[in-house]
Amino acid sequence: MFTGRRDECATLDQLIGALRAGESRALLVRGEPGVGKTALLDQLAERATGCRITRAAGVQSEMELAFAGLHQLCLPMLGRAGRLPVPQRGALLTAFGLSSGPAPDRFLIGLGVLGLLSDAAEERPLLCLIDDQQWLDRASKEVLAFVARRLDAESVGMVFGVRDPGQELCGLPELVVGGLPDADARELLASVLPAPLDTRIRDQIVAETRGNPLALIEIPRGSMPTELAGGFGLPTVVLPSGGVEERLRRRMGKLPAETHRLLLLAAADPTGDPALVWRAAACLGIAPEAAGPAVEADLAEFDVRVRFRHPLVRSIAYQSGSLPQRREVHRALVAATDQDFDPDRRAWHRAQAAAGPDEDVAAELERSAGRARTRGGAAAAAAFLWRSVTLTVDPVRRAGRALAAAQAEAKAGAFDVAVDLLALAEAGPLDDLQQAHCELLRAQLAFATNRGRDAPPLLLTAARRLETIDADLSGETYLQALSAAMFAGRLAEPAGDSKAVAGAVKTAPRRVRAHRARDLLLDSLAGLFTQGYEASLPSLRRAVAAFGAGLPAEEQLPALWLVCVAALQVWDDERWDALSRRYVDLARETGALSELPLALSMRAHFLLFAGELPAAASMVGEVAAAAEATGCRLAPYGAMTLAALRGNPAEALPLIEAATTDLQPRGEGIGISAAELATALLCNGLGHYEEARTAAGPAAAHSLDLGISNWATVELVEAAERSGEHDVALDAHRRLAEVAEAAGTDWALGVAARAGALLADGAGADRLYQESITRLGRTRMRTELARAHLLYGEWLRRERRRLEARRQLRIAHEMLETMGMAAFAERAGRELAATGETARKRTVPVTNVLTAQETQIARLARDGLSNPEIGSRLYISSRTVQYHLRKVFSKLGISSRRQLDQVLH
């Protein structure tokens, strides 16, 4: 008996060993058709004794049914769904059509699957085998790839059999399966030949089949004994390119006509349900005896499931039928499929059976698209709608359905397909509302794919068109346009920069700007760009206050990034704290994972300026995990600022350089300003004032970059004054003082007083430093307060007031060291030493022995989060959380969560 694939089996045995040791593995088994991927997966299942096995396989005809492959894999474990967190359980059951609810976020579905697999592996290792991954539906592909990338310590293995892996699996470990080595190929060929073969002919067959096992096995099955006798029939035996398929076609062509019809019918049904197949066969007058020849030829089996011996057989069985024959079997499947139990599959068969345009079928497909969308299957909804378009004659309905399909494709992330469908919609007769939706979708596609200069003008055009059609949507679109313009920043086109968008908002019909919180925000931000800072302050404050805790989540979430920016602009640290916290909470609670990276980034910045660098580092880690999970291309805003405040050039500069290189072609100008601000912060901490001044200057000059411009101006005053550019510092302070005076908050006035003290002398400087410390001491901005103590101490030492200087520098050094602002702390230490006092060395934090992920998990556990809650935040399973916590306890020498608070500061 043939026993090849020794090297490949050794790799599979290593995977099994890892599972038994409590580890997780993901693996792609990749190779051409017929090379033996399925056989290797079968061997893996046989060898994995003691493991639980669950399987799924992609089927071409089922590629448009959302979550069909995922349902195959998870079905044996769905009884455990009750143990999942409520949002994940709801998302998973809704996706599978087992409960009703709003369309779930696909990343919540992914977390639910990860939790389900992890829970199933608690009892014994779990091995998931997914064959023909290339034929899975898109939704299943995305979720399974998401899960595979997050396996860690769950004792879960995921092995994919695939021809050519798509982008979603890129980077996962691969086992490339080629043809058999010559010796193994000869052994396999000999095992299936009825008689010995001339060695030269045998070697020629092995060479021309390239050791493909399916090709080698098919030779005797498709050849007459006389052709193989002695090998003299070689010209008809050796397989040309594509010969496996041709040989299978010839074998199928020898079957009785009724058997051929039965195979065509079975190939058209992706479920493999024998009861359904035989009901449909009865409609066609096909008797059960027709299955016999196919079974005897080892092409298919009709048992508890209908199975083809290889996916190629199914494909050939279907493709070999004529178009009328295929329509006939689909009509039979329509008749055999229960309308109430499986309406969507029935609708799909009706579409395949249609000989031409059919409005009744098109309408049914449109209804199926609605059900698919409710289950979170945007890709499936698009497929149903696309087929609906092809069956629609009426040009008005055709254009409307094409637009709906484009919107579904865009939501599914298939932007190129969405653009094509959008063009089809625009070619048809559209009413004003549909035309406006087309323009809006085109603008949204530009922003999603570029996040740069193209999107703001397009969004602006869409908002204007919607003014007289849908005032509410027009207001939302104006807000999107303003957000897009702010992201584009200095790189925006003149017709689409923040001032241009704001001007359009101000001239829009008044009913577009009602008195709802969102519209108050839109109006106040537009006023900021058109009327100036002082004139817009009252409306900005009202807008920030309007977003209170009682506002519905669906109204808050899309606007909270801009609301937080507005809070920054009015220098209200208390509201920035509350709003950024609520932004993260709402994104998590509602499962709005597309909002989460931006929400976490905003919250991380508040924590950074509040001096809570460890907590901010945890948020930055979550940003990275969320961005990876959602495919969001958000610049590393929080990571750059964190590295800059830590004062670590080796960490900060590569981040800043990479971000700047990426942001320029994307057109994300606000990110370039953020990189310049981070550089200025880093260099001011290190005492490299000329470099800080060079970096801060451009960021401070771009006043349209709200928030960043003010912070950069603060850095510019210090950098310019310390590098001898007094006039530059004076001008920067003048602008800062005007804003601070208008804002009137302790944060604004405290920072302005600190900057003014740098430029003053004698009693004036002393008074301003003390005012700065008093005012900043009443705020949450601890980093600003610590830097005020530092600058005051440095000034006192130069004034030879050594004892007073020591006190200020001691406070600064202790605060800065405690917060983790190493470069600024070293500055304070050097100044303290110059007064004759040595700074006390700080104990090395125990967290230095932990990895970044262990530190993140430990802090979340210390803050009272459960393992499932931590897993949901970091996109890992609760079992992985427990695994890392055990390592944390061991490294820190503790035995319980209660002790974390004692060792983590």
Image (cartoon, helix red, strand yellow):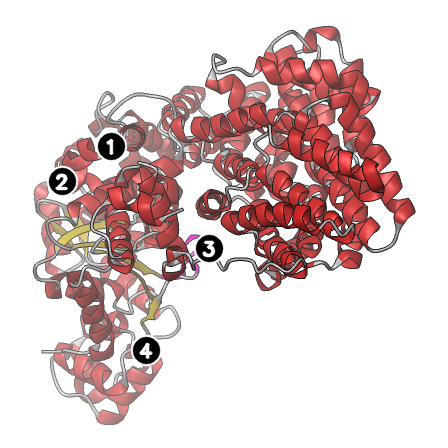
* Comes first in the chain, label 3 or label 2: 3
* In front: label 3 or label 4: 3
* In front: label 1 or label 3: 3
Spatial distance from mark 4 to mark 1, Cα to Cα?
A: 39 Å
Amino acid type at image mark 2 = Pro
Amino acid type at image mark 4 = Thr
Spatial distance from mark 1 to mark 2, Cα to Cα?
A: 14 Å
Q: Which mark is residue 209?
A: 4
User: Number of labelled discs?
Assistant: 4
Residue 820 placed where, x, y %? 52, 51
Disc 1 and disc 2 in contact, CB within 8 angstroms: no
Disc 4 and disc 1 in contact, CB within 8 angstroms: no
> Is 551 in front, or is 322?
551
- Vertical relation: 703 (above or below) 835: above
Q: Find disc 3 in the rendering and name its residue.
A: 167
> Is 443 in front, or is 509?
509
Residue 746 placed where, x, y %? 67, 26
Q: Is residue 168 magenta?
A: yes
Spatial distance from mark 3 to mark 4, Cα to Cα?
A: 29 Å
Q: Which mark is residue 76?
A: none
Spatial distance from mark 1 to mark 3, Cα to Cα?
A: 37 Å
Residue 438 placed where, x, y %? 64, 26
Report crowding for label 3: few under 14, some 14 to 19, many 20 or more residues within 10 A (C-alpha): few
* Comes first in the chain, label 1 or label 3: 3
- Vertical relation: 251 (above or below) 235: above
> Is 628 in front, or is 287?
628
Amino acid type at image mark 1 = Ala
Q: Find disc 2 in the rendering and name its residue.
A: 274
* In front: label 3 or label 2: 3
Residue 357 placed where, x, y %? 47, 27
SS majority, magenta: loop
* In front: label 4 or label 1: 4
